[in-house]
Amino acid sequence: MRLALLTAFVLVGFASNSLLTRAAINGGHLDPWTFMLVRLLTGTAMLAVLVRLRDTPSRDRGSWLMSLGLGGYAVLFTLAYVRIAAGPGALLLFGTVQLTMFIASHARGERLSPRHWTGVALAVAGFLVLTLPGLTAPDPLGALLMAGAGVSWGAYSLLGRRSTDPLSVTADNFLRASAIVLIAAVAVGLKGPYSVTGFVLATASGAVASGLVYAAWFALLPALPVWRAATIQLSVPVLIALGATIVLAEPLTARLGAALVLMVVGTWLTTAKSP
């Protein structure tokens, strides 16, 4: 039960992050670089407070290698966000995350049962049903940047499996990644717009949907085979689309319904024990 609740919290958090980003940037409240910087800094602050408030001392720290994965994801995603549409962006981002982590899974000797392979296939089908229709060829540089962001996130997730203190490790990684993004933001230039609404959305994204959720992700990863951790992330675009119908009043389409059914069945099969 704890594993299921933690998984649900992480996936909803990932989807919420995307909705908050869309509301702030597409709504004209904040520019992508300021949003990402505020997101990381407020996430760092929230995690630092929680680390200080708890009774147990820190048992582990982050590393520059993990921080490069997180910072690389943040920088490349921000650069790609303004160059590529949501559909091809999601396809490239989650596709490269999946590929990166499945390669690692194979290298680790993880093998899937026929039931699990069926679940993965259905989850991928649901993901493609949602993201493929209506795609146009993306900007080549935007596509390359988004694929790089996916590889960076996959690497960050793989490195995080070794963490023994997810809260402290994530706080440390966020602080270092903030420095990486700050350097990139200054180099590119912070051009606005700025608004109170934008900062509130970025703070919610950073303190809760990033800081707490990423720490929960590191707590979840050791309990999952690498291939399963990769597969469940494919549900995030479906949850984003479902959330948009609820929060942003976007229409509930037959395509979204089909993708949701395929994803639910596929996820159930991937989490079921082999007979």
Image: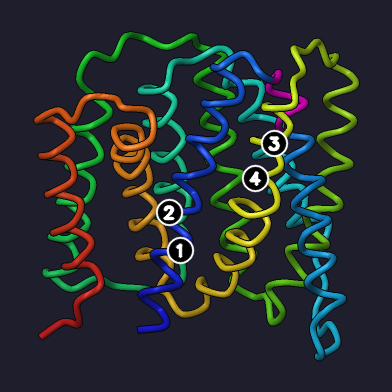
Image quadrant occupied by the C terminus: bottom left
Quarter assignment of residue 95: top left
Q: Amino acid at mark 1?
A: Phe
Q: Are marks 1 and 3 in contact (CB under 8 Å)?
A: no
**Nearest the camera: 196 or 116?**
196
Image quadrant occupied by the N terminus: bottom left
Q: Amino acid at mark 4?
A: Ala
- Secondary element under disc 4, as helix, strand or loop, is helix
Q: Are marks 1 and 2 in contact (CB under 8 Å)?
A: yes
* Earlier residue among tags 4 and 1: 1
Q: Which residue is mark 3?
A: 200
Q: Which residue is mark 4?
A: 204
Instruction: State the separation of the CA atoms marked 1 and 3.
Output: 21 Å
Eyeballing the image, is 209 above or below 72?
below
Horizontal placement of 255 versus 233: left or right?
left
Region of the chain picked out in magenta, as a range: 30-35
Where residue 240 appears, as percent x and y from the top left, is: 37, 39
Q: Which residue is mark 1?
A: 9
Any magenta on residue 262? Answer: no
Horizontal placement of 153 versus 63: left or right?
left
